[in-house]
Amino acid sequence: MSQSYQNLASDQICKVQNDKKLISFHDRLRAALPGSYAQIHAKGEFSENNHKVHSLIGVSIQDYSNGTGDRNIITRFHLSPEQVQFFLTRLTAGFQEYEWSISKIFGEPDQYGYSTAQQFSISRHARASDGREMKNPWRIQIINGRGIKVQNRNGGSYMQSGSFQMDKSAFIQLTDMDLYLLLKRVDAYVTEWERCIAPPLISNGKEMLANQQAQRQQMQRQPYPYAA
Protein backbone atom coordinates (compact mmCIF):
# COMPACT_ATOMS: atom_id res chain seq x y z
CA MET A 1 0.00 0.00 0.00
CA SER A 2 1.43 3.36 -1.00
CA GLN A 3 2.23 5.86 1.69
CA SER A 4 0.03 8.98 1.72
CA TYR A 5 1.58 12.35 0.95
CA GLN A 6 0.82 13.58 4.47
CA ASN A 7 3.03 10.86 5.97
CA LEU A 8 6.08 11.54 3.78
CA ALA A 9 8.91 13.46 5.39
CA SER A 10 10.63 16.25 3.46
CA ASP A 11 13.65 18.47 4.17
CA GLN A 12 12.20 21.28 2.05
CA ILE A 13 11.94 24.52 4.03
CA CYS A 14 10.11 26.61 1.44
CA LYS A 15 9.59 27.15 -2.28
CA VAL A 16 8.27 29.61 -4.85
CA GLN A 17 6.83 28.19 -8.04
CA ASN A 18 5.27 29.47 -11.24
CA ASP A 19 4.13 27.76 -14.44
CA LYS A 20 7.72 27.50 -15.78
CA LYS A 21 10.17 27.47 -12.87
CA LEU A 22 10.63 26.61 -9.20
CA ILE A 23 13.14 27.54 -6.52
CA SER A 24 13.32 25.68 -3.22
CA PHE A 25 15.43 25.79 -0.06
CA HIS A 26 16.36 22.65 1.89
CA ASP A 27 17.70 21.69 5.32
CA ARG A 28 21.33 20.61 5.10
CA LEU A 29 22.22 21.87 8.57
CA ARG A 30 24.62 19.84 10.71
CA ALA A 31 25.61 20.36 14.32
CA ALA A 32 29.19 20.82 15.47
CA LEU A 33 30.83 18.16 17.62
CA PRO A 34 30.73 18.69 21.42
CA GLY A 35 34.40 19.66 21.32
CA SER A 36 33.43 22.63 19.11
CA TYR A 37 30.11 23.30 20.84
CA ALA A 38 30.42 27.10 20.72
CA GLN A 39 30.18 27.02 16.91
CA ILE A 40 26.79 25.23 17.04
CA HIS A 41 27.07 24.69 13.27
CA ALA A 42 29.55 22.22 11.78
CA LYS A 43 32.35 24.10 10.02
CA GLY A 44 34.40 21.27 8.55
CA GLU A 45 36.07 20.17 11.79
CA PHE A 46 35.10 16.53 11.13
CA SER A 47 34.60 14.34 8.07
CA GLU A 48 32.18 11.69 6.84
CA ASN A 49 32.87 9.49 3.81
CA ASN A 50 36.07 11.44 3.14
CA HIS A 51 34.20 14.75 2.95
CA LYS A 52 34.38 17.56 5.50
CA VAL A 53 30.99 18.24 7.06
CA HIS A 54 29.57 21.75 6.86
CA SER A 55 26.21 23.07 8.05
CA LEU A 56 24.46 24.32 4.92
CA ILE A 57 21.24 25.35 3.25
CA GLY A 58 20.53 23.64 -0.06
CA VAL A 59 19.13 25.67 -2.95
CA SER A 60 17.59 24.12 -6.06
CA ILE A 61 16.23 25.77 -9.20
CA GLN A 62 14.10 23.81 -11.63
CA ASP A 63 13.35 25.02 -15.16
CA TYR A 64 10.58 23.01 -16.79
CA SER A 65 9.69 25.64 -19.39
CA ASN A 66 10.63 23.13 -22.12
CA GLY A 67 8.79 20.24 -20.48
CA THR A 68 9.20 17.73 -17.68
CA GLY A 69 11.16 14.52 -17.40
CA ASP A 70 14.45 14.66 -19.29
CA ARG A 71 13.66 18.22 -20.38
CA ASN A 72 13.39 19.42 -16.78
CA ILE A 73 16.62 21.24 -15.86
CA ILE A 74 17.54 20.96 -12.16
CA THR A 75 20.52 22.82 -10.70
CA ARG A 76 21.73 22.78 -7.10
CA PHE A 77 23.98 24.80 -4.80
CA HIS A 78 24.73 24.94 -1.06
CA LEU A 79 24.91 28.19 0.89
CA SER A 80 25.91 28.76 4.49
CA PRO A 81 23.01 29.83 6.74
CA GLU A 82 24.84 33.12 7.34
CA GLN A 83 24.91 33.86 3.61
CA VAL A 84 21.15 33.37 3.34
CA GLN A 85 20.63 35.62 6.36
CA PHE A 86 22.89 38.27 4.80
CA PHE A 87 20.75 38.31 1.63
CA LEU A 88 17.73 38.95 3.85
CA THR A 89 19.41 42.04 5.32
CA ARG A 90 20.05 43.39 1.80
CA LEU A 91 16.37 42.95 0.97
CA THR A 92 15.03 44.48 4.18
CA ALA A 93 17.50 47.38 3.89
CA GLY A 94 15.85 48.29 0.61
CA PHE A 95 18.80 47.90 -1.75
CA GLN A 96 17.61 48.88 -5.23
CA GLU A 97 20.75 47.54 -6.93
CA TYR A 98 22.65 44.53 -5.67
CA GLU A 99 24.94 41.82 -7.06
CA TRP A 100 26.72 38.90 -5.39
CA SER A 101 28.21 35.66 -6.70
CA ILE A 102 30.30 32.73 -5.55
CA SER A 103 31.78 29.57 -7.08
CA LYS A 104 32.80 26.24 -5.55
CA ILE A 105 34.84 23.26 -6.69
CA PHE A 106 35.05 19.97 -4.81
CA GLY A 107 35.37 16.22 -5.08
CA GLU A 108 38.00 14.02 -6.65
CA PRO A 109 39.05 14.76 -10.25
CA ASP A 110 37.73 12.50 -13.01
CA GLN A 111 39.93 10.79 -15.60
CA TYR A 112 40.28 14.10 -17.43
CA GLY A 113 41.29 16.06 -14.33
CA TYR A 114 37.94 17.79 -13.82
CA SER A 115 36.09 18.07 -10.49
CA THR A 116 32.51 19.09 -9.68
CA ALA A 117 32.08 22.86 -9.91
CA GLN A 118 29.12 25.09 -9.12
CA GLN A 119 28.33 28.78 -9.46
CA PHE A 120 25.66 30.82 -7.66
CA SER A 121 24.65 34.42 -8.28
CA ILE A 122 21.96 36.71 -6.92
CA SER A 123 21.20 40.22 -8.14
CA ARG A 124 18.62 42.96 -8.01
CA HIS A 125 18.13 45.57 -10.71
CA ALA A 126 15.25 48.03 -10.45
CA ARG A 127 15.12 48.71 -14.21
CA ALA A 128 15.82 46.76 -17.36
CA SER A 129 18.42 47.87 -19.89
CA ASP A 130 15.73 49.78 -21.81
CA GLY A 131 14.66 51.69 -18.70
CA ARG A 132 11.51 49.71 -17.93
CA GLU A 133 10.73 49.13 -14.25
CA MET A 134 11.31 45.49 -13.37
CA LYS A 135 8.30 43.65 -11.94
CA ASN A 136 10.61 40.82 -10.85
CA PRO A 137 13.81 42.68 -9.96
CA TRP A 138 15.59 39.79 -8.24
CA ARG A 139 17.42 37.16 -10.30
CA ILE A 140 18.95 33.99 -8.85
CA GLN A 141 21.01 31.71 -11.07
CA ILE A 142 22.73 28.39 -10.41
CA ILE A 143 25.19 26.86 -12.87
CA ASN A 144 26.45 23.30 -12.41
CA GLY A 145 29.48 22.01 -14.27
CA ARG A 146 33.11 20.96 -13.98
CA GLY A 147 36.45 22.63 -13.53
CA ILE A 148 40.08 21.97 -12.74
CA LYS A 149 40.82 22.08 -9.01
CA VAL A 150 44.06 23.68 -7.86
CA GLN A 151 45.45 23.28 -4.33
CA ASN A 152 46.67 26.42 -2.56
CA ARG A 153 49.41 26.71 0.05
CA ASN A 154 46.94 26.67 2.95
CA GLY A 155 45.54 23.27 2.02
CA GLY A 156 42.39 24.64 0.41
CA SER A 157 41.46 24.61 -3.25
CA TYR A 158 40.19 26.92 -5.96
CA MET A 159 39.13 26.61 -9.58
CA GLN A 160 41.71 27.22 -12.24
CA SER A 161 40.92 30.35 -14.21
CA GLY A 162 39.20 29.58 -17.51
CA SER A 163 38.72 25.88 -16.74
CA PHE A 164 34.97 25.94 -15.95
CA GLN A 165 32.77 23.89 -18.26
CA MET A 166 29.00 24.27 -17.87
CA ASP A 167 26.78 21.19 -17.76
CA LYS A 168 23.47 22.91 -16.99
CA SER A 169 22.15 26.30 -15.92
CA ALA A 170 18.87 27.62 -14.54
CA PHE A 171 17.68 30.98 -13.23
CA ILE A 172 14.49 32.45 -11.82
CA GLN A 173 13.18 36.02 -11.53
CA LEU A 174 11.51 36.96 -8.25
CA THR A 175 9.56 39.85 -6.79
CA ASP A 176 10.62 41.48 -3.52
CA MET A 177 7.79 39.62 -1.78
CA ASP A 178 8.76 36.27 -3.31
CA LEU A 179 12.34 36.57 -2.12
CA TYR A 180 11.32 37.89 1.30
CA LEU A 181 9.04 34.87 1.79
CA LEU A 182 11.87 32.48 0.94
CA LEU A 183 14.63 34.13 2.96
CA LYS A 184 12.45 34.89 5.98
CA ARG A 185 11.29 31.30 6.26
CA VAL A 186 14.84 29.99 5.97
CA ASP A 187 16.01 32.47 8.61
CA ALA A 188 13.17 31.43 10.94
CA TYR A 189 13.98 27.75 10.42
CA VAL A 190 17.69 28.24 11.13
CA THR A 191 16.81 30.09 14.33
CA GLU A 192 14.49 27.31 15.51
CA TRP A 193 17.03 24.62 14.52
CA GLU A 194 19.66 26.35 16.64
CA ARG A 195 17.25 26.53 19.58
CA CYS A 196 16.68 22.77 19.36
CA ILE A 197 20.29 21.76 18.77
CA ALA A 198 22.10 24.21 21.04
CA PRO A 199 20.95 23.19 24.57
CA PRO A 200 22.22 19.56 24.58
CA LEU A 201 25.23 20.45 22.44
CA ILE A 202 26.32 23.28 24.73
CA SER A 203 25.64 21.24 27.86
CA ASN A 204 27.69 18.28 26.62
CA GLY A 205 30.44 20.54 25.30
CA LYS A 206 30.79 22.48 28.53
CA GLU A 207 30.91 19.24 30.50
CA MET A 208 33.69 17.99 28.22
CA LEU A 209 35.58 21.25 28.62
CA ALA A 210 35.20 21.21 32.42
CA ASN A 211 36.51 17.63 32.59
CA GLN A 212 39.53 18.56 30.47
CA GLN A 213 40.29 21.55 32.69
CA ALA A 214 39.95 19.41 35.83
CA GLN A 215 42.35 16.82 34.40
CA ARG A 216 44.93 19.49 33.55
CA GLN A 217 44.69 20.98 37.04
CA GLN A 218 45.12 17.55 38.60
CA MET A 219 48.21 16.90 36.52
CA GLN A 220 49.67 20.28 37.50
CA ARG A 221 49.19 19.48 41.22
CA GLN A 222 51.06 16.19 41.00
CA PRO A 223 54.63 16.50 42.37
CA TYR A 224 57.48 15.97 39.93
CA PRO A 225 59.66 12.91 40.80
CA TYR A 226 63.08 13.82 42.14
CA ALA A 227 66.09 12.64 40.21
CA ALA A 228 68.10 9.91 41.94
Image: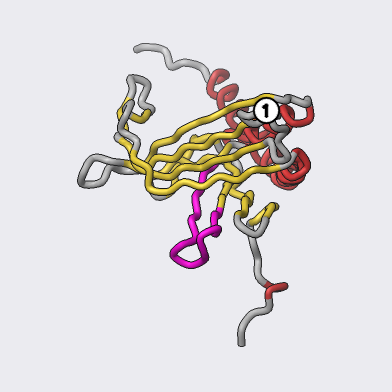
Range covered by the magenta-colored residues: 62-78
Tell me if residue 207 can be seen. Answer: no
Q: Position of residue 212 (x, y in %)?
A: 58, 30
The N terminus - image quarter: bottom right
In the rendered image, the quadrant that contains the C terminus is top left
Residue at 55% of width from left, 45% of height from top? 171
User: Relative to 190, is 68 above or below?
Assistant: below
Q: Is residue 67 magenta?
A: yes
Disc 1: which residue: 131
Q: As displayed, is residue 11 above or below residue 174?
A: below
Looking at the image, can residue 63 be seen? yes
Mark 1 lies on a secondary structure that is: loop
Q: Residue at x 59, y 22 (%)?
A: 217
Foreground residue, 5 or 218?
Answer: 5
Task: Please identify the residue farthest to the front as the structure is shown.
Answer: 130
Is 66 placed left or right of 124 in the picture? left
Between 49 and 119, the one lying in front of the other is 119
The single residue placed furthest to the bottom in the displayed view is 1
Residue extending farthest to the top is 227
Q: Amino acid at mark 1?
A: Gly
Which residue shows up at 33% across the image and 23% down it?
A: 152
**Residue 15 position in % (x across, y down):** 68, 53
Residue 98: name its quadrant.
top right
Instruction: Count the marks.
Output: 1
Q: Residue 53 appears at what percent x and percent y? A: 49, 42
Image position of 33 (left or right of 96)? left
Magenta run includes residue 181? no
Instruction: Indicate the colouring scheme.
Output: secondary structure
- Residue at horizontal 76%, vertical 40%? 180
Q: Residues within 10 Å of mark 1 (few under 14, many from 20)?
A: few
